[in-house]
Image (spheres, rainbow, N blue to C red):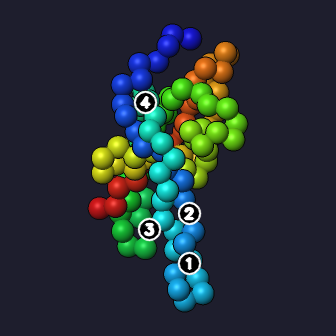
């Protein structure tokens, strides 16, 4: 495998449940760190949910590998942020035989 060109600076975030003061919880995001990444466009689709048109685009995002349990290791449920864009991670696997890189399968959704 040729080394990917990690030329995009992304912020890795994890969901955190915060008490809402009424006995329930709301979800907020906690910053885990910054990662350099290569982003490749996948496929796109459009769905309608609750009367809203939702465009969904999948991406393959490559980052440097980190050990299991390290806060800098992406995991399903985390997201990567670049400015106003948010890429929700739904799967992570090793991108190469030497386990030097991780491939994050992510989806960017835009409500129109």
Residue under label 1, please give it.
19
Quarter of the N terminus within the rendering = top right
Q: Position of residue 41 (x, y in %)?
A: 40, 33
* Residue 46 showing in the rendered view: no
Q: Secondary structure at mark 2?
A: strand
Q: Along the horizontal axis of the image, is 29 left or right of 68?
A: left
CB-based contact (under 8 Å), mark 3 and mark 1? no
Depth check: give the residue in front, 45 or 97.
Answer: 97
Residue under label 4, please give it.
36
Q: Nearer the viewer, mark 3 or mark 4?
A: 4
Is residue 30 depicted above or below 3 in this figure?
below
Q: Earlier in the sequence, mark 2 or mark 3?
A: 2
Residue under label 2, please give it.
16
Q: Earlier in the sequence, mark 4 or mark 1?
A: 1
Mark 2 → mark 1, Cα distance in angstroms: 10 Å
Q: Which mark is residue 45?
A: none
Q: Secondary structure at mark 1?
A: strand
Q: Earlier in the sequence, mark 2 or mark 4?
A: 2
Q: Secondary structure at mark 4?
A: strand
Mark 2 → mark 3, Cα distance in angstroms: 25 Å
Q: Nearer the viewer, mark 3 or mark 1?
A: 1
Depth check: give the residue in front, 32 or 62.
Answer: 32
Mark 2 → mark 4, Cα distance in angstroms: 23 Å
Mark 4 → mark 1, Cα distance in angstroms: 33 Å
Q: Earlier in the sequence, mark 3 or mark 4?
A: 4
Residue under label 3, please give it.
49
């Amino acid at each position: 495998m040729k080394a990917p060109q990690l030329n995009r600076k992304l912020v890795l975030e994890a969901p955190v449940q915060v008490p809402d003061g009424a006995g329930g919880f709301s979800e907020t995001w906690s910053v885990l760190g910054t990662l350099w990444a290569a982003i490749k466009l996948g496929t796109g689709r459009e769905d309608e949910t609750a009367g809203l048109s939702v465009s969904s685009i999948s991406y393959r995002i490559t980052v440097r590998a980190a050990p299991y349990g390290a806060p800098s290791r992406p995991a399903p449920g985390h997201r990567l942020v670049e400015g106003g864009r948010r890429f929700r991670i739904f799967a992570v696997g090793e991108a190469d035989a030497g386990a030097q890189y991780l491939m994050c399968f992510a989806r960017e959704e835009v409500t129109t």
